[in-house]
Image (cartoon, rainbow, N blue to C red):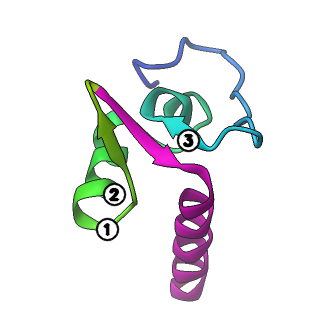
Amino acid sequence: MSRYRPRGADLVLLNEEKEFHTIKELINAGFGSRSTIHRHIIEDGLPACKIGYRVLIPREPFEEFVNAHLVKHMAKT
């Protein structure tokens, strides 16, 4: 089980009103671990900006990124 989410914890839905998501929010929503999200930022071009110590991911580009990767993954299966 992920060390970022307690065993048996429900996934948290992302707030669609926010312009940016934090990595912690994406982890809690079930989009992977911290290292997986960082890998997507570094290797796969997931848009992100760093403000101080916080890494923020813009909501709309994140949704486009997820949709594109879902289509790519579904094409492989």
- The residue identified by callout 1 is 44
Q: Which mark is residue 40?
A: 2
Report the predominant secondary structure element of the magenta stretch. Answer: helix
Report if residue 56 lies within the magenta region: yes
**2 vs 3, front mark:** 3
- The residue identified by callout 3 is 20
How packed mark 1 is, by other alpha carbons closer than 10 Å (few <14, some 14-19, many 20 or more), is few
**Residue 5 rendering spot, x and y as whole percentages:** 52, 18
Marked residue nearer the N-terminal end (3 or 1): 3
**Residue 4 rendering spot, x and y as whole percentages:** 44, 19
- Whether residue 14 sits left or right of residue 46 in the image: it is right
At a point 52% along the width and 72% down the height, the residue shown is 69
**Residue 27 rendering spot, x and y as whole percentages:** 50, 32
At a point 70% along the width and 37% down the height, the residue shown is 14
- Whether residue 48 sits left or right of residue 32 in the image: it is left
How packed mark 3 is, by other alpha carbons closer than 10 Å (few <14, some 14-19, many 20 or more), is some
Q: Are marks 2 and 1 in contact (CB under 8 Å)?
A: yes
- Quarter occupied by residue 10: top right
Magenta highlight range: 54-76
How packed mark 2 is, by other alpha carbons closer than 10 Å (few <14, some 14-19, many 20 or more), is some
